[in-house]
Image (cartoon, rainbow, N blue to C red):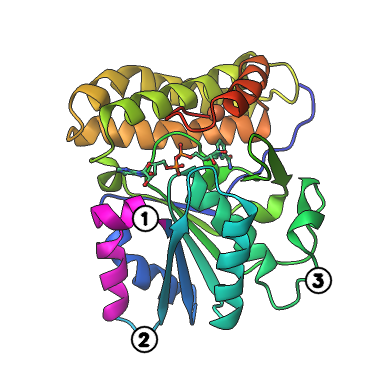
């Protein structure tokens, strides 16, 4: 067998309604002041409300930042970072799709009191240094797998993106609460679900860094999602289908985080640049 390494998030909580005990989970981690990073769509739907109200029953102050935009730009990072520093938060929760989770990763790193780096310094592979604030990730789409990947993708121009890749972006806890995904519209369920299935297919069929662990994750991800994507699209309230899609997308994320995606995603990047405002999956 060829040698390999496999890295993923330290802890994964897969539990219906887990988001409604977010403050309890933060207290178990001894966190003292938390910033929840999300977008206005989530807030408009009230998806975050159970998580937020759990803090009313705790001693932990919560600051909600809801200005994340689809394909987040550097200006969103600067805005969130200024608030995190001003409020002296000591932990970050990403709550939403890949856009919110990616912003949360970068803020957890740059808002650490010992951080000497600027955003521009961390682009590329392995350039982020030091420590980050405690990080909890709560995905509300079943697609990117960002809760278990080492990547954050930031939009740097009209049609250009830049990525930072570092093990520091693997969170302390990923919370999979499929109830949060029950209201995902059918076309978003389909697009993000196919994206996740392609993560698994490319991780399994690509040769570079392919390993027995990534193969296990990719096969189980495809089994779950192939069995449930139609039900999730046709009946958004089908809890079993939503659980399969969320767990499947996470497993696919673990697979491609350790055995990278290939030609299909390479083709998607220039197409994504050419169609920046369509509701596509990435
Ligand atoms: N870090 C990684 O590993 C990785 C991998 C692939 C893509 N990405 C990045 O992820 C981003 C895309 O993420 P995404 O596809 O998850 O979407 P997103 O985070 O951009 O959200 C898209 C829209 O869906 C809405 N939404 C989210 N959850 C919902 C729910 N449960 N119900 C109803 N609406 C909901 C949001 O409010 C938003 O309007 C891009 O910026 C992409 O570059 C990151
Ligand atoms: Fe993708």
Q: What stretch is highlighted in magenta?
A: 39-56
Task: Point out residue 73 in the picture as x, y percentages from the top left corner.
Answer: 60, 50
Q: Does the beta carbon at disc 3 come under 8 Å from ligand 1?
A: no
Kindly report the distance in space between the C-alpha atoms of the residues bearing marks 3 and 1: 30 Å
Q: In this view, does 145 lie above or below 38?
A: above
- Give the residue number, with chain letter if any, for mark 1: 40
- Residue 161 bears which disc, if any? none
**Which sits earlier in the primary sequence, circle 2 or circle 3?**
2
Camera sees residue 243: yes
Question: Do callouts 2 and 1 mark residues in contact (Cβ within 8 Å)?
Answer: no
Q: Which of 257 and 1 is in front in this view?
A: 257
Mark 1 C-beta closer than 8 Å to ligand 1: yes
Which residue sits at x=46%, y=27%? 280
Q: Where is residue 215 in the image (x, y as percent from the top left)?
A: 59, 22
Image depth: mark 3 or mark 1 in front: 1
* Badge 2 or badge 1: first in the primary sequence: 1
Q: Earlier in the sequence, mark 3 or mark 1?
A: 1
Q: Is residue 28 left or right of residue 231?
A: right
The residue that label 2 is drawn on is: 59
């Amino acid at each position: 067998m060829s040698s390999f390494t496999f890295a993923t998030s330290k802890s994964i909580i897969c539990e219906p309604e887990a988001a409604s005990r977010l403050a309890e989970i933060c207290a178990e981690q001894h966190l003292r002041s938390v910033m929840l990073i999300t977008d206005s769509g989530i807030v408009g739907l009230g998806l975050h409300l159970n998580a937020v109200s759990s803090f009313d029953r705790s001693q932990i102050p919560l600051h909600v930042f809801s200005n994340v935009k689809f394909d987040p730009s550097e200006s969103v990072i600067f805005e969130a970072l200024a608030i995190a520093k001003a409020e002296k938060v000591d932990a970050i929760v990403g709550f939403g799709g890949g856009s919110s989770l990616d912003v949360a990763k970068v803020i957890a790193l740059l808002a650490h009191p010992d951080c000497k780096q600027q955003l521009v310094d961390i682009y590329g592979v392995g350039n982020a240094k030091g420590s980050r604030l405690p990080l909890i990730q709560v995905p509300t789409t079943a697609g990117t797998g960002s809760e278990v990947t080492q990547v954050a993708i930031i939009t740097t121009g009209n049609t250009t993106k830049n990525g930072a890749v570092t093990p520091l972006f693997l969170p302390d806890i990923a919370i999979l609460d499929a109830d949060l995904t029950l209201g995902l519209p059918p076309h978003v369920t389909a697009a993000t679900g196919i994206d996740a299935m392609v993560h698994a297919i490319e991780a399994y069929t690509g040769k570079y860094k392919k390993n027995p662990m990534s193969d296990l994750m990719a096969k189980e991800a495809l089994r779950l999602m192939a069995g449930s994507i139609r039900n999730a699209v046709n009946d958004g309230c089908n809890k079993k289908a939503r659980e399969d899609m969320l767990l499947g997308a996470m497993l696919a994320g673990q697979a491609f985080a350790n055995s990278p995606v290939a030609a299909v995603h390479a083709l998607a990047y220039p197409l994504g640049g050419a169609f920046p405002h369509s509701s596509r999956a990435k």
